């Protein structure tokens, strides 16, 4: 028997002022686009903004539904728009932020499991890691080099031959 270890490192910044200008701008866009979320059921508004390899910027927000499972996360709304508006252009970085009617938005959140699977598919499809910038409306910022790092032992298209 041998024991394997999975680990990855990520950057932690105390707040947005420690980011470079481009990352700080992208995060501020993600923070402000939360206003376009439609989240009357969870009262949790998520904003995700991508900058693409060609410099284009695309945003997504969570869109809920009275039939709860129909709702879709900000990250997958975003990826669908990117793929449709700018086909075959890799995503460089996605900034993700949120607001909540019941809680302070003062710490980073990270994508749900389904979104991790979708982000990984996009990385694989365009052969480029997607950097993530995660933060609330204030406070610490996490920067992760590749979204795929968040999904160890992922099921990918390799298994399908
Ligand atoms: N949500 C996102 O949009 N992205 C995430 O990464 C986590 C959760 C949304 C789904 C739902 O509309 C609300 O946040 C509460 O779960």
Image (cartoon, helix red, strand yellow):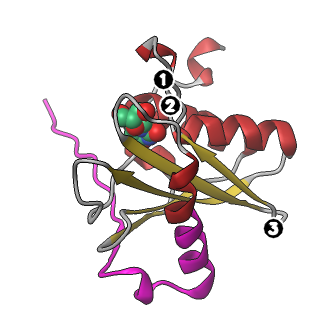
Q: Is residue 124 visible?
A: no
C-alpha distance separating marks 2 and 1:
8 Å
Residue at 53% across, 53% down: 35
Q: Is residue 15 above or below residue 149?
A: below
Who comes first in sequence, dot 2 or dot 1?
2
Which numbered mark, 1 or 3, is in the foreground of this view? 3
* Callout 2: SS: helix
**Is disc 2's CB within 8 Å of ligand 1?**
no
Q: Residue 129's x, y, as percent? A: 61, 53
Can you identify the residue that label 2 sits on?
117
Along the line of sight, which residue is nearer the eye, 34 or 52? Answer: 34
C-alpha distance separating marks 3 and 2:
24 Å
Task: Specify whether 5 is left or right of 43.
Answer: left
Task: Specify whether 52 is left or right of 111.
Answer: right
Tell me whether the residue at label 2 lies in contact with that at label 1, contact meaning CB atoms closer than 8 angstroms: yes
Q: Residue 33's x, y, as percent? A: 57, 57
Can you identify the residue that label 3 sits on?
55
* Callout 1: SS: loop
Mark 1 crowdedness (10 Å alpha carbons): few <14, some 14-19, many ≥20: few
Residue at 63% across, 36% down: 77
Residue at 54% across, 32% down: 63
Q: Residue 91's x, y, as percent? A: 70, 54
To which quarter of the image does residue 130 belong? bottom right
Range of magenta residues = 1-29
């Amino acid at each position: 028997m041998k024991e394997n270890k999975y680990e990855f490192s990520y950057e932690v910044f105390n707040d947005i002022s420690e980011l470079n200008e481009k990352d700080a701008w992208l995060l501020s866009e993600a923070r402000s686009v939360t206003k376009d979320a439609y989240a009357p059921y969870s009262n949790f508004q998520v904003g995700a903004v991508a900058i693409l390899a060609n410099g284009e910027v695309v945003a997504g927000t969570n869109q809920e539904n009275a039939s709860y499972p129909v709702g879709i996360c900000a990250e997958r709304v975003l990826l669908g728009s990117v793929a449709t508006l700018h086909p075959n252009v890799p995503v460089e970085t996605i900034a993700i932020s949120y607001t909540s009617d019941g809680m302070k938005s003062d710490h980073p959140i990270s994508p749900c499991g389904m979104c991790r699977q979708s982000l990984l598919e996009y990385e694989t499809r365009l052969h480029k890691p997607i950097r993530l910038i995660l933060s609330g409306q204030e406070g610490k910022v996490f920067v992760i080099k590749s979204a795929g790092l968040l999904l160890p032992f992922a099921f990918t298209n390799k298994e399908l031959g």
